[in-house]
Image (tube, grey):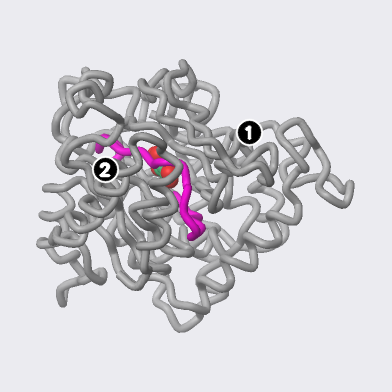
Amino acid sequence: MTIDTSKSIEACAKYYGEDEVAMRDYLIAGEARALALDNRGPIRFDEDGNLDPAILDAYSRYGFYIFENVLDDAELNEIKADLDAMRDKFPTGPESDVNHRGEKALGAGNKALNLVWSKPLGDPLGGTSLANGRHEVKMFEPEAKTDTPAAAPFILLGSLQFSEACLRVYGHPDLLKVTEAVNGKDFAPFNEALFIKDPGIGAAVSWHQDGVTHWDNPDFDQDIHGFNFMAQVYGSTAVNGVWVLPGTHKQGKLDITKLVEASGSERLEGAVPIVCNPGDVAICNRQLLHGSFPNCGFEPRVTVNFGFHRRSSVLGVAGGGVHSDSQTFDEKVIARRSRTIGYAIDARKQHFPHETPYVYEPFAKSNETYAWNGNARADLRDYNIDDLSI
Ligand SMILES: O=C(O)CCC(=O)C(=O)O
C-alpha cells in the first residue's frame, strides 16, 4: 500500500469523541488484517486465457479480491478529468436543477435518478426503509466542521452516460474476462455508480448485504446476487474505504442488528477495509456484508462501481426495485440494458486500439454490433431506468 493513512486515522478517530481510542485501534488493526490477507495481485490468466484458479479460490473464500494496477496513470487522469467536468455540472444542491453558473445541471430533466446527496458525514441510508431497509443500523454521524457545505455529493447513478472514461473502464477486456469466469460467458449487467467520499464530508454507507431477491431461492448460492467491481481513482483506505466481513457472502441473509450488538458497536469484529492504491480494482460479492464509515480523513475516495450478474439470476425475475422501478427482466429488457456493454467495448477499442477488445458472447451469437458515436451517446440517456436490480 502506498497511501500513508497515519494522519487520517488520527484525525478520523478524533471525530468519535469518547470512542476515539476504540476507533483509532479499530482502523489500525483492520488495515493490518486486510494487508495480511492473500487476496490481492494483478489479473492473471493461463496460456488458454483462463483466470488463475487461485484468484477464483481467494475470491470465493473471502468474498472479495483486489486486482492491482488495472488502470494506469494516463487512464486515471482521464477519469479525473471527467470527474472534474461532471462536478462542474453538478446541481448546486439536492433540490437544484442548475449548476454553480446557473446552467442546466448534470442529469436535470432525466427520468431516472442520478445524483444522491447526504448531509456532510451523515449516514442517509442507515436505519431507514430506503433500499428495501437493507441498511438496518444507523452509523455514528460525526459532526462536520462548520465551514463545510450544507450537502455532500454521495452517489451518482447511471454514471456511464456522463463519463466516457468510466464507460471505457466498463469495457476493460481483462475485467470482462474476470466477469465471465465468475458469472459465465452470457453474463448480464447490474448497475453502475460513482461513490463519492470527499474528505471531511463524504457520507457513510451503513453495513448491508446488497441482494434483495434470491435469499430464499432454492438454488441460492454465494454468487446468485452477482458482484461489483470497485475501481479506485484515488485509492481506498481504512478511513475512507468500504469495509467487509470476509466470508459472509456464503452465510445467507444476516441479522446485522445482532452483529452490531454482539460487537458492542458498529465496529464489527473481524471486518477489514478494502485497501487499494489508485488504479486497483476490487471485486466484491454483493452478498458480502459491507459498508463504509463517513470520510473523516484527508484522502478523497471515488469508486467507479459497476456490477454484473449471471443471466440466470435476472432472466424472468421481478426486479427488487432498489436501483430502478421494479419490472420483470425478460430477454428484451436484458438485451436493452446490455447495450452498455456493446458501447463500452467499442468506446474502449477506439481509445485503446492496441488492446484486444473483449468479445461478448451474446452479441457474437446474435450478430449484434455496437458503435460508440453521437447517436450512442444520446441513446445512453436514462439507460439506468433498466438497471437489473436484484
Ligand atoms: O462505496 C461505498 O462506500 C459503498 C459501496 C456499496 O455499498 C456497494 O457498492 O454496494
Residue 94 lies, in percent from the top left, at 71, 33
Numbered circles on residues, count: 2
- Under 8 Å from ligand 1: the CB of mark 1? no
Instruction: Decide: is 172 above or below 351.
Output: above
Asked if marks 1 and 2 touch (Cβ < 8 Å), the reply is no
User: Closest to the observer: 235 or 224?
Assistant: 235
Can residue 53 be seen from the camera position used here?
yes
Q: Does the magenta stretch include residue 89?
A: no
Quadrant where the image shows the C terminus: top left
Q: Quadrant of the rendered structure where residue 289 is?
A: top left
Q: Residues within 10 Å of mark 2 (few under 14, many from 20)?
A: many
Residue assigned mark 2: 244
User: Marks 1 and 2, Cα distance to the nearest angstrom?
Assistant: 27 Å
Dominant secondary structure, magenta: loop
Give the residue at x 37% y 62%: 5
Q: Left or right of 48: which side holds 299? A: right
**Which region is colored magenta?**
286-305
Can residue 157 be seen from the camera position used here?
no
Residue assigned mark 1: 113
User: Closest to the observer: 80 or 182?
Assistant: 80
Pointer 1 or 2: first along the chain: 1
Residue 287 lies, in percent from the top left, at 26, 35
Kindly identify which numbered label has been placed on residue 155: none
Q: In which quarter of the image is ligand 1?
A: top left
Q: Left or right of 166: which side holds 127? A: left
Give the residue at x 11% y 61%: 53
Residue 387 lies, in percent from the top left, at 50, 36
Query: Mark 2 is on which residue type?
Result: Val
Q: Quadrant of the rendered structure where residue 384 is?
A: top right
Give the residue at x 14% y 34%: 250
